[in-house]
Each structure stands twice: as structure tokens, then as C-alpha cells.
Amino acid sequence: MKDVTKSKKSVIENSTPLSDTRILGIETSCDETAASIVENGRVILSSVVASQVDLHAQYGGVFPEVASRQHILTIYPIIEQALQQAHMTISEVDAIAVTRGPGLAGSLVVGMNTAKGLSLASGLPVIGINHLEAHIYAAWLYFQNEPVKSEPQFPLLSLIVSGGHTELVFMDDHLNYQRLGATLDDAAGEAFDKVARLIGLGYPGGPAIQKASLSGNPLAFNFPRAWLEGTWNFSFSGLKTAVLREVRKLEEKGGSLPVSDLAASFQAAIVDVLVSKTMHAAQDFHAKEILVAGGVSANRSLRDSFQMRASSPVHIPSIALCTDNAAMVAGAGYYRFIKGQSDLLNMDVLPNWPLSET
Ligand code: KG4
Ligand code: ZN
């Protein structure tokens, strides 16, 4: 790592006010091609996301080769749009932050190579960002036309719930992660997607289950909650199997499936476990505040349940920032940039990169 903050440090030493720092974020870890400009790790000047969801819906999930080909087609126009919307040129950017992993290798490579190319052409430092860290830093962000958002305070208990991950993480400071537990099988988002398929709803399953649940009874089916007492781990495969068994039973009886009741009862079970375990961990680890991030944190029932049940302040990114975007990458990039991180241009993508080794 080379120190890129020297010029900023000497500005501090000369007691001249520190200028604003703008990071260009690039995200291509899965099926969203995204670019964004964020100021000082908090204010979104622009955020452009090109979703491939319609392309993948026909396959019932993300088709990796299709995803990387689509990233190649859209990445440059998306970056141009992000710069234009922020009324900036690349020369006004301080650094480029790019998702290095975890994610689909072929998708990550597109963002990484683009970032390296831009870095070579502009001389800007490039910083590789962990996608889960980026999800966490979405909680610091707000759009420039919004009121200033309160900043999460450490120590923090973070729950990351996305399509590929479900993790409970304790943070006593910026960029410091202690992984308390994770899912032993399906990620929360994956469970939403699989159950949606089981009950005949489309992809992605999370928003479809949320919508169907609105007209369903969450008490219609008493689906199991795997508490895994004594650990901070999660397990959702038993819940998924219980839904499958119920669906088979109902199909044998004939008639149409009570899709809304199944969706609402499944959602209630998963939300109950996520909220209860996170609150319990926050108490045990004396966390001041709770942070919830990742695609599943867009879920209305999960958001409401946290706000109703938690006794400490809960930070959840605005809905648009819960699912994959590049503003969160730029946000995390800022905190690494001011610490002096810059990666070498021979860095490679890390498709299985954990957030923390501990
Ligand atoms: O964070 P994300 O956009 O991508 C990954 O990093 O995986 O998360 C995508 C996941 C999908 O499984 C999707 O079904 C889920 O987030 N999701 C939701 C909702 N919106 C997206 N799950 C439940 N309720 C939602 N409203
Ligand atoms: Zn994600």
C-alpha cells in the first residue's frame, strides 16, 4: 500500500482547511452495473445503477456469463453518467474505489479492470473494497438534496443480510470488524429467493415475497425458527424445507396455493430470527447502536420490526441504497483513503473475500 494522503496531511499541518474529498465508486460484483461520486464518505453527488434484473429473470437467477457481458457493455456509459450528474470530470476526483470481492469472478473483473484503466489514464489511486464493507458504509450516506443524516456511533452491532451473505459483525471503530456469526447454510436473501420460487413468485424473490405478504396472514403457518442458542449463527434451510413440505401437502390436497399466507408466514419467521438475534448480540456486546445493511434490509417488515423492537438506535440505509450500488463502495473507499490506503495495480479480484478473518 502506498500513502496517498501525504498532500492532505501537509494541508492539515499548514492548518489550511481540508478540501472536500470525492471518490468515484465502481460496483460490478453481481448483476448491477453501478458508478457513483460521493463526497467525504457521506454525501452522494450522483449514483447510477443499471440493473440487469430483467435479463436474468428468465433464468430464475443470475446467469454469470450474461452478467459479465452486460457489465462490459454498460460500465463506461454508467461512469460517464455518474460524472455528468455530479457535474465533474475525472480530474476532480481524488480516488477510485472499486469492489474487489466477494462476488462473481467474471463480473468483478470488469469493474476492476475498468478502475485500473482509469487509474492508469488519470494517475488517480485505486482502492479495492470488500462488498460487505460497502454495504455497511451505505448507512453513512445521504443524497445531497436530503437533510444531513445522523452518523452511526461506535461500538456498533451490524447485521449484513444480502443475497449471498448473512453475518453479525461487531465494530468498535471504522473498518474494524469482529465477525460474531454467519449463516451455516442459505443466506437470508437466498432463502427469500428460493422460497419465492417454491410458491410460484418471480425473481428476485425478496420484493415479490414482501408484496405478496401485504395481503397475507403471518400467523397462518407456524414455520420454524432456528435459534441456534449459544451461537451467533443463523440457519434458514430448515425454514425453507418447512415451506416446501407445506407446499407439497397443500398441492396434494388440490386447489390453489395460499401464496400470500405462505409468503407472510415465511417472512415473519425470518424477520423474527434476524431481529431477535441481532438485538440480543447488541445487548451482549454492549453496542451503542445497531446497523442493518444488504439487499434484505430493504424489506419493509424487517425495517419496521427493528424500529419497533430495538431499544438502541437502528441505522438502515434508505431503500435505494440497500441493494447493490456504487455509492456504498465510494463511501467505504473514503474511509480507507483517509487512512492512506491505495492498492497496487496488480491487485486481483477476490471472489470469496471474507469481511474479516476473525
Ligand atoms: O445486497 P444485494 O443487492 O446483492 C448481494 O450482495 O447479494 O441483495 C440481493 C438480495 C436478493 O436475494 C433479494 O431477493 C433480496 O436481496 N432483497 C430483498 C428485498 N429486496 C431485495 N429481500 C427481502 N425483501 C426485500 N424487499
Ligand atoms: Zn450486495
Image: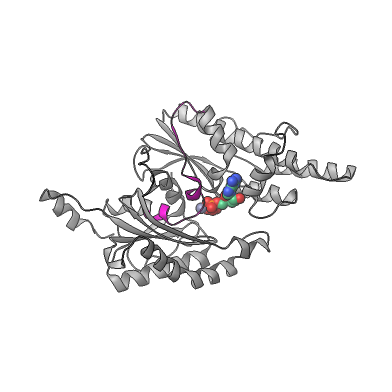
Whether residue 307 is visible to the viewer of this picture, yes or no, is yes
Q: Depth check: 203 or 340 in front?
A: 203
User: Residue at horizontal 17%, vertical 58%?
Assistant: 7
How many numbered badges does the structure rendering display? 0
Name the side, left or right, on which 30 lies relative to 326.
Answer: right
Q: Is residue 175 above or below residue 280?
A: below
Percent position (x, y) of residue 216? 72, 37
Q: Looking at the image, what colour scheme do you see?
A: one colour
User: Residue at horizontal 56%, vertical 45%?
Assistant: 296
Q: Depth check: 18 or 243 in front?
A: 18
Is 12 contained in the magenta span?
no
Q: Depth check: 103 or 81 in front?
A: 81
Give the residues drawn in magenta, as a range: 310-330
Q: Is residue 252 above or below residue 62?
A: above
Quadrant containing the N terminus is bottom left
Q: Residue furthest front?
A: 145
Percent position (x, y) of residue 271? 60, 36
Whether residue 164 is visible to the viewer of this picture, yes or no, is no
Q: Residue furthest left?
A: 14
User: Residue at horizontal 34%, vertical 68%?
Assistant: 345
Q: Is residue 350 above or below residue 288?
A: below
Percent position (x, y) of residue 245? 79, 42
Quadrant containing the C terminus is top left
Q: Residue furthest right?
A: 253
Percent position (x, y) of residue 208? 66, 49
The quadrant holding residue 157 is top left
Is 312 contained in the magenta span?
yes
